[in-house]
Image: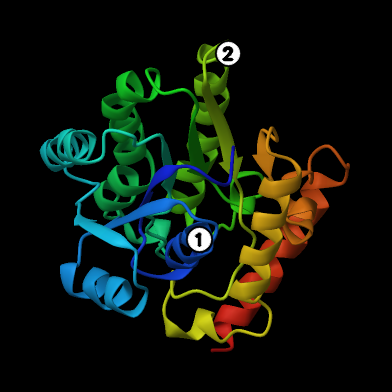
Amino acid sequence: MQTTGNTLLITGGGSGIGRELAKAFLALGNEVIIAGRRESLLKQVTEATPGLRHVVLDISDPADTRRVAEQLIATYPKLNAVIHCAGIMRGESLRAGPTELEATVNTNLLGPMRLDGWLLPHFLEQPHAAIITVSSGLAFLPLALTPSYCATKAAVHSYSQSLRYQLKGTGVKVHELAPPYVQTELMGERQAHDPHAMPLKDFIDEVMGILQHSPDADEILVERVKPLRFAEANGGYEAFFQSFNDQMAAARAGE
C-alpha cells in the first residue's frame, strides 16, 4: 500500500487502533475519513485532529453499509483505500448455552465483506487502491475465553487470502493486519492500561514502519504477534495452545 496520496476510510476510527492509524496517515498527507457508530465520539476525534473527516456508519447493518459506501463514493470520488478496524471482542461461556453471536459476526466479518463489495467496483477504477483487513494473532492461536471473536478473525484471514487471489493483476492491493494484544479498550478500560499488552503508540509506529518499508507485504506483522501467527508452523502448537490458554484463564480468575 502506498502510504501517501490516498483518500482513506478507516472504520472503527473513533478509538484505539483505528483512531491512531487515522492520525498517522493524516500526518503523511492523506485525506482520511473515520467511521463509526457514535457520532459524538467521532466529533471529539475530528475536533481534536484538524483535517480528519468523519461519517456515521453501523457496519453491522447491511442497508447502512450500502448507504454510506454510496455516499462516500459520491462525496470523495478519489476514495481508494479502506482499513477495517471496527471490531467487537467479548468473553463467552459456551457451557452456559447459546451466546449473542450476531453483533460479533456482523461487525467483525460480514460488515467488512459487505463494505468491500460496495467499494470494490470503485476501487478498481482508481490508479491504485488498497484494502487492509484486520484479523488478529488470535486468528492463528485462539483465546478460548473469546471463541466467537477468534472464529471471526480466523475467517477474516481466510477471506483476505481469497480476496487477494481474486484481485491479482489489478491495481487493488490486499493487506492483512494481525495485531497482538494491544493497549486499547477493545475489552474494556483494564486492557488500555494492562502492562502485558503492547503500548498502542509502539504498535502504530511499528505498523507504519512496515507499511513504509514493505508496501507490498501481504501480512502486516509486528514482532510481538509473530509467536501467535507462526505457532503451528514453529511446532509444539498443542502445548503452546494449552499453556497460553491456561495462563489467560488463570489471569482472569484472579481478577
* Side (left or right) of 240 relative to 97: right
Disc number for residue 239? none
Q: Nearer the viewer, residue 101 or 158?
A: 158
Disc number for residue 21? 1
Q: Name the residue type under label 2.
A: Lys
Please name the residue shown 28% across and 59% down the image.
53
Please name the residue shown 41% across and 23% down the image.
126
At which x and y percent is residue 85? Answer: 43, 53
| Outermost right residue | 235
Label 2 or label 1, whichever comes before in sequence order? 1
Q: Label 1 crowding class (10 Å Cα cut-off): few <14, some 14-19, many 20+?
A: many
Q: Name the residue type under label 1.
A: Leu
- Mark 1 element type: helix
At which x and y percent is residue 191? Answer: 52, 79
List the residue tagged with mark 2.
Answer: 168
For residue 227, above or below residue 62: below
